Amino acid sequence: SSRRDPRPDRSPWLAGVSCRALASSAPTDAGDEADDRLDAFSDEDAFGSETPVEPGFEIEVDVLVVDDHGGPPATGSDTMPMEALAVALERDARVLASTLVDPKRARRKSAAKDNRDDADARDRDFAALESLSKKLFPDGPDEVSYVELSVALCTDAHIRALNAEWRGKDTATDVLSFPAETFGEVTVLGDCVVSVDTAGRQARDQRHGLWEECRVLLAHGVAHLAGMDHEDGEEEAAEMSRVESALLRALEASDEDGERGEIRAAPRLLGLIASAEAGERGEGRDFGDPALDGNAFATMSVSNEPEPSHPASAAAIPAIREKAEKQTLRFPRSVDVDPARRLNRRADVLFVDLDGTLLNNEGVVTRRVADALRAAAEKGVLVCVATGKARPAARRALATALLDGAGGVTGDASPGVFLQGLDVRAPGGGSISNASMPEDVVRDAFAFHGGEMRETRRVQGDASANANASSGELLTLRDSSYAEPATALTAFCGEECHTVGAEPHALLRELASRFHEPKSVPWDDVDSLLSAARATRLEDDRETSGVSKLLLAADDAATVSFWRPEWEALLGSRAVVTQAVPTMLEVLPVGHDKTTGFETLVRRLADESGLAFEAGVKPAKKTSPDEDGDFVSGASSLLRVVAVGDGENDAGMLRAASVGVALANACDETKRAADHVLSSSNEEDGVAEAVSKFVL
């Protein structure tokens, strides 16, 4: 496919945005060279050499990938990389544009290709689309000579920034539509912006592939570009739903043209409105604005099976859905104050750390631990995470056990403590606390790391390097010839990570792959990083850095232990240095940590529930040996909070909770702070033991 540059003059949202076209049907500019990355994923490879019969008008489609805000996005699939997805969506966008202008042609093709017994429904769908098309093109398709449509693929962070700027909603969403409203002989439909991150989560929830979900979002977005608005009442919503269905039918019929190779759509996709009304897309769906469509809602992954490869098996789908229904359980989003239910459990709220606590050493929630959390939820216990992770990372971690999304532990509307208490979410998902690092701390940290620390490396048993060096001893070498420094530094900026350097350090790549954190975006210098950080958090105040926290990663705990005193001396009283993982050092703004975040959220929960809570106050316990840790059964006015952790950063939270529980792998400080120390570690499902003893 040939490509061209984006057109910011026609797309105001593109102003200042770094993006590039991965697929395009536009004529190639003179002198343009083909994009080598598409060599393996051309239209011919994906769909066969046979080309569908074209309409009597020119269609120009661009599929752009946005590099800003942690981009480019990733599909997470070897069989459907971003380049292949772009090619597939370029073809789909052409079909949708053609269908919108000439729906009768698409209707005939659908009727000829579809032998399923739903002709009446098909006729109703296409009747709605033909009515819409007649309004847009009263002289018919013969009078149209040119149609243009753009599709942009981005990250959650980027679509969140767009949603905040254009709709005043500071949250990620799945699709935004920017209509050009130019209809006639030359028609410019506008732009559909799709978050690949959100689409991926929704695809898992719907039990179809990422490409299928992008098709659903694209059909919805195109209906909005055509001027439809489901918020104009039930009748308009029903009409728009039928238009979505007709567009998807046209896509399905087009799949029969030529051999599709490894890419094939699952049978009969429901449109966005229809699937939401059927209860298949979480609760509280917000379909957003008529001009800029923001479809923000939480979804819950329904299986930990790998995403089905293409082609999808139609026979397997009912079994998958049946399995999903059995596994789905709704976790409470607020404190359950029902007296009878409270008498049937030991705690009202469970706060649990992630790394080293809820997650095993592979970064996964085990089946036994997940089942324990579900057992707590069945008794009405509110389960909240309290973690140093960014919120998207926490959600990815919980998704390993089907605990993320609508009705899960983490989701758009779930309460929780993230980024070491720098991002606190109340029930409903709204932010009730956030903080930013002083700019001078960020500058000094990166200067220190890029200066003195880059000259330090680990010598492992190389006596020739230094006669006094023993294996594993840290030495300062005035030699910059080694390939990579022994440590890496990244800045957490809201839900993104940014670093300085030509490319992310191997340790930062591991941070993303193993610990689920956002990929670190490299910048040439700290000035560029700070500009990006402020843009990420939508902050214009030059005195605000936009950086929530800093994280120093090393290969081993000894390196971190060596450098910690140096960092504490460097930062002094300007910031707080703490640890959650032995191989990582974290720098936080003064006055903000996991304990303050925990207390902020618990106070909100207490206020909303009408129950009493005071940090550090430990209720009396029954004394019989088999009831160790149980609360006094008559303490009905107290909000009973259990907190479980392992790291140094968890110690204050355990002291503040009604009952603080440390796992066997906890550090000494956290064990001293805990009311109870378990015999089980995170590798031995310690959280399951804690739930059994102190929650149920």
Image (cartoon, rainbow, N blue to C red):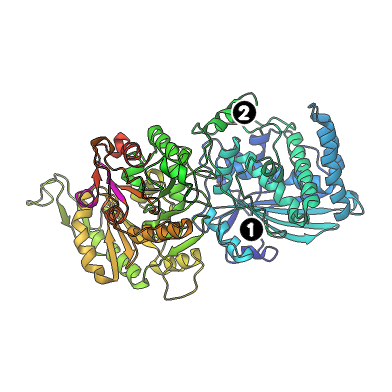
Judging by the rendered image, the residue that carries numbered circle 1 is 5
Q: How many numbered marks, from 0 up?
A: 2
Quadrant for residue 680, please give it: top left
**Residue 402 image offset from top left, x and y in percent:** 48, 38
Q: Is residue 314 above or below residue 352?
A: above
Label 2: how many residues lie within 10 Å, few (<14), some (14-19) or many (20+)?
some
Label 1: how many residues lie within 10 Å, few (<14), some (14-19) or many (20+)?
few
**Residue 238 image offset from top left, x and y in percent:** 78, 47
**Residue at screen point 64% across, 56% down:** 294
**Residue at screen point 74% across, 46% down:** 94
Q: Name the side, left or right, on which 605 lies relative to 461.
A: right
Instruction: Quote the CA–CA distance across marks 2 and 1.
Output: 40 Å
Q: Residue furthest front?
A: 634
Q: Is residue 648 visible?
A: yes
The amino acid marked with disc number 1 is: Asp
Judging by the rendered image, the residue that carries numbered circle 2 is 317
Q: Nearer the viewer, residue 660 or 405?
A: 660
The amino acid marked with disc number 2 is: Ile
Q: Give the magenta part as a residue range.
A: 659-673
Rendered-image quadrant of the C terminus: top left
**Residue 674 image offset from top left, x and y in percent:** 24, 49
The reply to whether the magenta stretch includes residue 353 is no
Q: Nearer the viewer, residue 505 or 627?
A: 627
Q: Is residue 500 visible?
A: no
